[in-house]
Amino acid sequence: MATISQSFFFIILPFLLCFKLGIASSVPCCEPIEANDVDLIQFALNLEFLEAEFFLFGAKGAGSLHSLPVAARPQLVAGRPILKTSSVESLRSSVIKRSAILGSAITSEVEGLRRPQLDISPQNFENFFDQAVGRTLEPPMDPYANTVNYLLAAYIIPYVGLVGYVGTIPYLTNSSSLALVASLLGVESGQDAVIRAALYKREGEIVEPYNITVAEFTRGISNLRNQLGMCGVKDEGIIVVDPQLGAENKTDSNILSADANSLSYAMQPREIMRIVYGTGNESQPGGFFPAGGIGNIANDYLKGFSIVNV
């Protein structure tokens, strides 16, 4: 009887969380949340911190001044940077821009927050890759081993920030907030386009030793993000199997991920947390954010997680 009661609690928990936050909807919650401009922009800091740390390690072999715990860091050979080939050289400038954004643009608009606990270790990426391809890869796929692996790891992160900004803009009320997020979206979309274009050039290349093409990896990653987000198709690989999912429902080439009208998809904070936590649950931290995100929006859902563990 106790098992049935516990199962019932976990079934109704998402409904309770939606009700708690003033949202009347079916489960999973896919609608926008009620939040002010500051909370929405501070939520975006979670992904900006994650991206900055990941790309700094890739470009320089070291992270920010506030270094990550050893277990959560990349294991680079003698601090060797990854972004050293011409095919991804343009990402270096993106790293610089992103550092500038974190250092001034966001914090000039809203109060800065302490960086969340992050995990960009090979083990965390390996778990994501395994889920994306539906099997345990042997040997484990190290995202920092070579350029192709790193590009595929990079494919995982910025797109979520891009569609998050698209989902945020309609709900901002202050002109300065709109201007900031529009500028952030411009940089984010450019960065994602560079990564997707670099992978598109390699779409038929076999990722050794797994006998899986680059295009198949991107398709698996995108499908996994759709599954974790639980709000329909909002993500596509660089080559789509069904042309109905391509531009104008006619093409399988998919350098930019967009709907049939070539309009960007949009995601809400709940979807983003489900994906970057890797749990499919906005109240259950994990993945890139072992202790959950920062800011009022993330904290509201973490309180729900605390209730579960009481």
Image: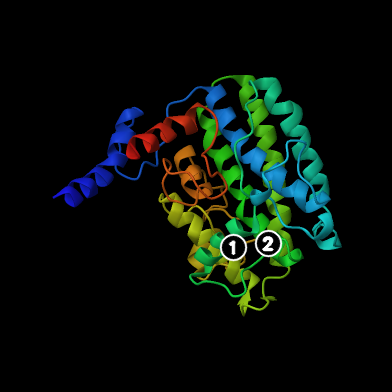
Disc 1/disc 2 C-alpha distance (Å) = 8 Å
Q: Name the residue under label 1.
A: 126
Q: Mark 2 points at which residue?
A: 143
Residue 129 visible in the snapshot? yes
Q: Which residue is drawn at 60% across and 43% down?
A: 161
Please, what secondary structure does the residue beneath circle 2 have? loop
**Marks 1 and 2, the one that precedes in the sequence:** 1
Q: Is residue 32 visible?
A: no
Tell me: residue 27, above or below residue 104: below
Q: Locate residue 34 relative to residue 42 in the image: left or right.
A: left
Nearer-the-camera pick, 110 or 283: 283
Q: Residue at x 33, y 31 (%)?
A: 23
- For disc 2, the neighbor class at 10 Å (few under 14, some 14 to 19, many from 20) is many
Q: The disc labelled 2 sits on which kind of residue?
A: Pro
Of the residues shown, which amino acid type is indicated by label 1?
Answer: Glu
For the residues bearing labels 1 and 2, Cβ distance under 8 angstroms = yes
Q: Is 45 located above or below residue 275 in the figure?
A: above
Spot occupied by residue 291 in the image (x, y as percentages of width and height): 52, 40
Q: Is residue 29 above or below residue 114?
A: below
